[in-house]
Amino acid sequence: MSPAKWTEPVLHGEATDWQAKFCLRCALMTSSAIREILKITQRPDIISFAGGLPAPEIFPVKEVEAACIDVLRTAGQEALQYTITEGFLPLRQEIAKEMHQYGVEAEPPNIFPTNGSQQALDLIGRIFIDPGDVIVTDSPTYLGALQAFASYEPKIECLPLDNDGMQVDHLEEILKRNKVRFLYVLPNFHNPAGVTLSLERRIALVKIAAKYGVPIIEDDPYSQLRFEGEELPAIMTLHKENTIYMSTFSKILAPGLRLGWVVGPQALISKLVQAKQATDLHTSTFVQMVVHNVIQRGFLGGHIKLIRKVYGERRHIMTDAMEQCFPEGVTWTSPQGGLFLWVTAPEGIDTRELLKTAVEHKVAFVPGTYFFPHGGGLNTMRLNFSNAQPDMIREGIKRLGATLKEAIGRLR
Amino acid sequence: MSPAKWTEPVLHGEATDWQAKFCLRCALMTSSAIREILKITQRPDIISFAGGLPAPEIFPVKEVEAACIDVLRTAGQEALQYTITEGFLPLRQEIAKEMHQYGVEAEPPNIFPTNGSQQALDLIGRIFIDPGDVIVTDSPTYLGALQAFASYEPKIECLPLDNDGMQVDHLEEILKRNKVRFLYVLPNFHNPAGVTLSLERRIALVKIAAKYGVPIIEDDPYSQLRFEGEELPAIMTLHKENTIYMSTFSKILAPGLRLGWVVGPQALISKLVQAKQATDLHTSTFVQMVVHNVIQRGFLGGHIKLIRKVYGERRHIMTDAMEQCFPEGVTWTSPQGGLFLWVTAPEGIDTRELLKTAVEHKVAFVPGTYFFPHGGGLNTMRLNFSNAQPDMIREGIKRLGATLKEAIGRLR
């Protein structure tokens, strides 16, 4: 049978106008500005603080190789076969142990592996948000969450951030006025802002949410990456029954595997399982078994220490360089963990414009305004400190400092 | 820092009534009946024809191991890092070559890797279906597609099946009366029915769809698994501009990896990429690179021949056993490929009831009615012939024959 005979089409129409075929929801799905920025900044001559990439030099490549071999030799057929949507039970047991390190007591039925925590955000949007429903986020907030939720067409009410995280004092007013589906919170080393929610605010948040019966979504990819200061309790430990917690192996192991997890009450997990079954049947059996194999021997503890050390050094190198190179009037957060810090330039600087001259200086960042659900923050930007190596960080900050000086000079 | 101090909750509420918190969409997301059946039939004493599992004995475990080692040693950091949503370019190039075997000429920008073809179905639902929009499927049809689309709340118009596949003669009437978003078709070795759409109907389908400007979704997981008869052209080859094609490595390599792909016009692929970015950022870099590594040396050709041989034998063993053991009045399809065949018992038999006695006889199947979007087909059932080994197939069909005899006896 030659495929050649098949190449005779019955019809050879005009190119279809696909834009006209898409449904209304698609108007909400635009390619993110960040995505476009990241494409530009992938040029090898540019020092990019724009992405959110972990340091690849310390990925546990050898441990993953050993795990692949072990899994395939001892349970190859199982690893390559379909599995249940709920996830690979031994992995869920390991995550339960891991959660103990986060201060959260959970059993396997409360734990649900997903394709990175981005999928958890999508599934949560799917089970909670009908078009027009109100949700509450901080502002700025994680852009991936805004994108995941946008498909379900929510109305977003925002709480501003300061150095102690989400400003919860306006929350009660919002909850009084609206039937709110959930609160979305990034308590530790916030993406993009790098700030951490104070204990006082965590407690206040939990009490107000409970009073109005509004679930809290605790998005916590970074808490294990604390290189300074004292750990704070997970929101889930403060009110377990009302919290849906999510985290990921992307920052403590490797993002290319795509494995995250949700912790929550069983009724919630069951609904997420139904939602996930319809979206992709299950997360890769092989990936789940490989990650289980890597972590079951207690590998993560030592590895997380290494990541903390490397990221802590890089954050210090970056803020030291900023002290030296950034002009007066520019301020920044000094996160005690995570991957990102937040820079505020003087009023009047539009960092979207600044990015253009920065790219001419061969350095890049993400303009902060993209992280605000309702706009604003034109003079802000997000910098990643985990991915670039020390010399590159110093050189990149020098270039960015020069760019800022020029722009501020033009303001006067 | 001891996690112990964290275990003091601020609030210790009543268990939240999560059902009351979920959005309206959730009413459409019920756990599939099949899922529940599969749980029962996983008892080791039951011979199950209920699942849709490939034969694990012939999974290429050693080739996957070699690929993992090669990928991690030559490009470990890349394999464990984030990648672009569009997918790993060398994999897309290999899929383009593979598509040539299917008679479809495509370039990498037309090809989009997904987490199995189930994710492709979800993303297609997401970009085409607003609540109340009309789509057309065959009936019975693939249950996973119904579940994926259900989240987007379509109205489904159905075309009945016969031995030549979807009966397209009623299609024009439906397209005249409704603004239809897309036609969903399983042209080869239909799941659940095992039938294949004839060339005449493919041509008719393409012409009518083009006349009304309605895109065709061609879901083709099985065409490479033809063990008898002559190949038919993919619908995409008949009208490329109006067809969205999808297939998967689940049936020709291994389902546990979760890797499928979509082929389509670039404007369509761009929108799917946006949709996928919001749902899970990207498909596992590692899995994409491992599959690329396995297939780049031309492994699939020989492996697919082996699968065809094994499944062809099993299908023959099953239909031979049915000839011997099934009572008069029971008919079945004899697929020339794929994983499933379709049994029709005499009117009056409800296969949901039959399943209960079948399980007592320690054999299982899926009642056919679950595959009908609007019900019906109470006397039908789906049998899988790829997963059980020959002796088990013979024994299972014997048990099912006895179960059918009893039930038919009770009818009189």
Image (spheres, coloured by chain):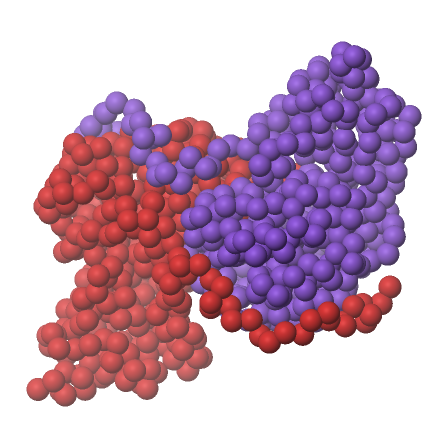
Chain colours: A red, B purple
Figure quadrant of residue A146: bottom left
User: Which residue is depicted at the point 16% across and 32% down?
Assistant: A211
User: Which residue is depicted at the point 65% across and 23% down?
Assistant: B352
Q: Is residue A138 left or right of residue B172?
A: left
Q: Estimate the x, y position of residue B376 in percent, counting from the top left.
A: 64, 32
Q: Is residue B8 left or right of residue A393?
A: left
User: Which residue is depicted at the point 76% across and 14% down?
Assistant: B411
Q: Quadrant of the C terminus of chain A?
A: bottom left
Figure quadrant of residue A73: top right
Q: Estimate the x, y position of residue B37 in percent, counting from the top left.
A: 62, 27
Q: Is residue A262 visible?
A: no
Q: Relative to A186, is B43 above or below?
A: above
Figure quadrant of residue A365: bottom left
Q: Is residue B291 left or right of residue A222?
A: right
Q: Quadrant of the N terminus of chain A?
A: bottom right
User: Which residue is depicted at the point 82% across and 27% down?
Assistant: B330
Q: Relative to A9, is B215 above or below?
A: above
Q: Relative to A261, is B212 above or below?
A: below
Name the foreground residue: A141 vs A313.
A141
Q: Is residue A63 left or right of residue A173?
A: right
Name the foreground residue: A204 vs B161.
B161
Q: Estimate the x, y position of residue A364 in percent, counting from the top left.
A: 32, 76
